[in-house]
Image (cartoon, rainbow, N blue to C red):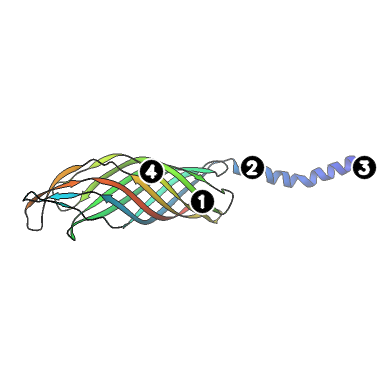
Amino acid sequence: MDINKTAVAVLFALLPISAHAKDAELADSTFRYFASIKGGMSQLSNSDRVVLSNGSKLDAESTSHEGFAGIDIGAYTPGGKSRIYYSFEQHTSETKFQDTSAYETKANMHLISADYLFRHDKSVTPFVGLHIGYSSVEPDSQFPDGFDVSGIVFGLQAGMNWQVAEPVRVELGLRHSLVPTDIETWNGTDSDGNAVKFESQQNGVTSLFIGASYLF
């Protein structure tokens, strides 16, 4: 058998495989952009208190878990080992004194997150990451007075990412953020219409979420 003819035949036989491998390598070397929606339960914890008209003070009860929603927009880095993305989230909590609802607190958060993905070549991928951003916290009440605490927030997140189909992923995660802890004093009234003074201090936001993303 002619060795040259054999080599040429083998070369042509391998061309589709080489082209496929090159295409796969090229696809793996590009950024994959994504957008996602998420929701779940979160706790916007605080250390609020009220100064009554007689001068005595009452501490607020622990806040309960409330529903929240958010969006993510970002990209997976070439190779899929990490990702960076922008998030917007809105969290709320109800503040009670002696089982009586006084007001709600609302936090709008703008975050930049970076995650590292373990087992990135598998369909189920654990991840862990950090985030930093900006938040604005204010009360939602019938009182004419209030407060607005804005500033830098930071924290961490971890969870599990599941590739349901090639462009669709679902994830379950836990996130904790530290928010500005400035104490703000503002005016209100009690149930009898007497003037009172509130002291509001935020501690942090902890959330358990589930999300669905689409890759472009």
Return the disc, 2 or 4, that comes first in the chain's sequence.
2
* Residue farthest along the top direction in this orientation: 152
Q: Amino acid at mark 3?
A: Asp
Q: Residues within 10 Å of mark 4 (few under 14, many from 20)?
A: some
Report which residue position mark 3 lands on: 2
Return the disc, 1 or 4, that comes first in the chain's sequence.
1
Q: What is the C-alpha distance between the residues marked 4 and 3?
A: 68 Å
Mark 3: which secondary structure? loop
Q: Residues within 10 Å of mark 3 (few under 14, many from 20)?
A: few
In the image, what residue occupies the spot 64% across and 42% down?
Answer: 25
Pair 1/3: label in front: 1
Q: Are marks 1 and 4 in contact (CB under 8 Å)?
A: no
Mark 4: which secondary structure? strand
Q: Amino acid at mark 1?
A: Pro
Q: What is the C-alpha distance between the residues marked 1 and 2?
A: 23 Å
Q: What is the C-alpha distance between the residues marked 1 and 3?
A: 54 Å
Q: Quadrant of residue 135?
A: top left
Q: Position of residue 74 (x, y in %)?
A: 46, 44
Report which residue position mark 4 lands on: 155
Report which residue position mark 2 lands on: 25
Q: What is the C-alpha distance between the residues marked 2 and 4?
A: 34 Å
Report which residue position mark 1 lands on: 126
Return the disc, 4 or 3, that comes first in the chain's sequence.
3
Q: Are marks 1 and 2 in contact (CB under 8 Å)?
A: no
